[in-house]
């Protein structure tokens, strides 16, 4: 069964490679040969080693990632992705299943497992030390993976594996590490444990497993495409990887469906609130968030309005209107920021002042014109 699934894809890739290899001129890089098997095996064996340097770099990466997540610093999180050496052992796992190399698979798997535990533990301890218990967008973004994240993991695994087979494209590997983001989800797992929030823990765990499974599956297919290993050797490993991806695809698919529903609902709710309600039509809407929770739509709305201009009965009418228009149960949470305005002077006073100043200027001109010049 797995051979029927994977052979057509690999055969297509090889045909495409053959077509591209006939190009010349600026396309000659497409005809470059992959690394010899011994050299690639030695390289991946080194990167999969659970060495002291590996753990030091991973520890520092987890420190940067955790502090960046707590501070909401995107730049720090990107830096942690570049520093993290976790991509190497995972690509080593992909190579091991294509070659049927159990020693390399155990070595790389040990590095990934212990590295993940180190990252989670570091994040947990840092949260306890720092004492920040606030969830920001950088943390929340890594708790709701969808099929899009699986696609990113598959693409990153293919890019990382292909980059390992070519010296000429090795410079692109840091970009692959940034794209797939392995350490930040692990740090969020530790943050979720420190906060005691199960939704953060399970959401970020799903994201990491999604990235891991996607990299191993697509990486293994790329190695076979490049004539490393064989389908016979890789059959068990690819079967397990495919089954894992399909299993993870179920919750990811539901999350994707919820994301689409929320986005459409947010657009519709925003239009209805701004255009179809008198209560909020002329207010300053600062924040609008829509989320699907237990079959209902949770709408969080924050508006700026003069104090006393919005009453509770108006909010209830808006709630009834939205439930009728959307045909769904609505949980409406409205936060009104009181805005106080000041106006110094009236319009009549300003007009009288301008007319008075103009009259004085006219009298001055008349007096100066009546004075005859001497001599």
Image (spheres, helix red, strand yellow):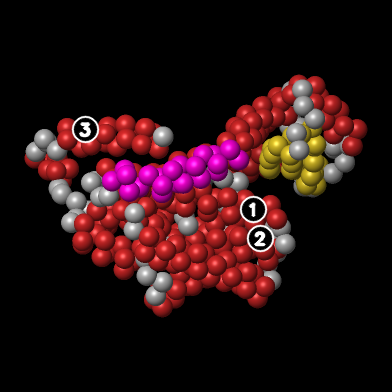
User: Can residue 320 be seen from the camera position used here?
Assistant: yes
Where residue 141 sits in the image (x, y, percent)? Answer: 58, 49
Q: Are marks 2 and 1 in contact (CB under 8 Å)?
A: yes
Residue lying at 14% horizontally and 43% vertically, measured from the top left: 31
Front position in the image: 211 or 101: 101
Kindly state the secondary structure of the residue where label 3 is placed.
helix
Tell which tag, 1 or 3, sits nearer the viewer.
3
Q: Look at mark 2 in the image and give the residue it sits on.
A: 192
Please say whether residue 232 is one of the residues in the magenta stretch.
yes
**Going by the image, does 195 lie left or right of 7?**
right
Front position in the image: 320 or 171: 171
Task: Establish if 213 lies above or below 151.
Answer: below
Q: Look at mark 1 in the image and give the residue it sits on.
A: 202
Tell which tag, 3 or 2, sits nearer the viewer.
3
Quadrant in which residue 293 is drawn: top right
How far apart marks 1 and 3 lie (CA) works out to 41 Å
Kindly state the secondary structure of the residue where label 1 is placed.
helix
User: Can residue 322 be seen from the camera position used here?
Assistant: no
Q: Look at mark 3 in the image and give the residue it sits on.
A: 15
Magenta region: 230-251
Front position in the image: 133 or 167: 167
Task: Establish if 283 lies above or below 210.
Answer: above
User: Residue furthest toward the bottom?
Assistant: 52
Kindly state the secondary structure of the residue where label 2 is placed.
helix
Tell me the crowding category of disc 3: few under 14, some 14 to 19, or many 20 or more residues within 10 angstroms, Cα based: few
Please say whether residue 102 is one of the residues in the magenta stretch.
no
Q: Earlier in the sequence, mark 2 or mark 1?
A: 2
Where residue 22 sits in the image (x, y, percent)? Answer: 11, 35
């Amino acid at each position: 069964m797995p051979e029927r699934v994977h052979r057509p894809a690999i055969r297509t890739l090889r045909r495409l490679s053959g077509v591209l290899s006939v190009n010349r001129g600026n396309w000659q890089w497409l005809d470059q040969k992959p690394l010899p098997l011994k050299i690639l095996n030695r390289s991946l064996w080194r990167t999969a080693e659970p060495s002291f340097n590996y753990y030091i770099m991973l520890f520092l990466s987890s420190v940067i990632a955790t502090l960046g997540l707590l501070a909401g610093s995107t730049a720090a999180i990107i830096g942690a992705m570049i520093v993290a050496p976790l991509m190497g052992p995972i690509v080593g796992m992909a190579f091991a299943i294509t070659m049927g190399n159990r020693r390399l698979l155990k070595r790389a798997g040990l590095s990934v497992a212990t590295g993940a535990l180190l990252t989670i533990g570091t994040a947990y301890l840092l949260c306890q030390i720092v004492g920040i218990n606030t969830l920001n967008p950088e943390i929340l973004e890594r708790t709701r993976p969808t099929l899009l994240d699986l696609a990113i993991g598959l693409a990153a695994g293919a890019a990382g594996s292909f980059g390992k087979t070519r010296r000429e494209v090795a410079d692109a590997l840091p970009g692959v590490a940034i794209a797939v983001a392995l350490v930040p989800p692990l740090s969020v797992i530790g943050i979720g444990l420190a906060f005691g929030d199960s939704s953060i823990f399970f959401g970020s765990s799903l994201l990491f497993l999604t990235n891991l499974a996607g990299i191993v599956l697509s990486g293994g297919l790329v190695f076979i495409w490049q004539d490393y290993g064989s389908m016979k050797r890789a059959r068990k490993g690819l079967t397990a990887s495919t089954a894992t991806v399909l299993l993870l695809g179920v919750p990811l698919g539901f999350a994707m469906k919820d994301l689409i529903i929320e986005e459409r609902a947010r657009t519709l709710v925003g239009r209805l609130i701004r255009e179809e309600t008198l209560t909020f039509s002329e207010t300053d809407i600062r924040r609008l968030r829509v989320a699907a929770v237990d079959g209902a739509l949770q709408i969080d709305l924050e508006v700026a309005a003069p104090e006393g201009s919005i009453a509770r009965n108006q909010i209830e009418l808006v709630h009834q209107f939205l439930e009728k228009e959307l045909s769904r149960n609505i949980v409406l949470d409205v936060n009104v920021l009181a805005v106080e305005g000041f106006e110094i002077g009236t319009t009549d006073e300003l007009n009288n002042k301008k007319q008075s100043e103009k009259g004085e200027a006219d009298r001055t001109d008349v007096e100066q014109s009546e004075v005859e010049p001497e001599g």
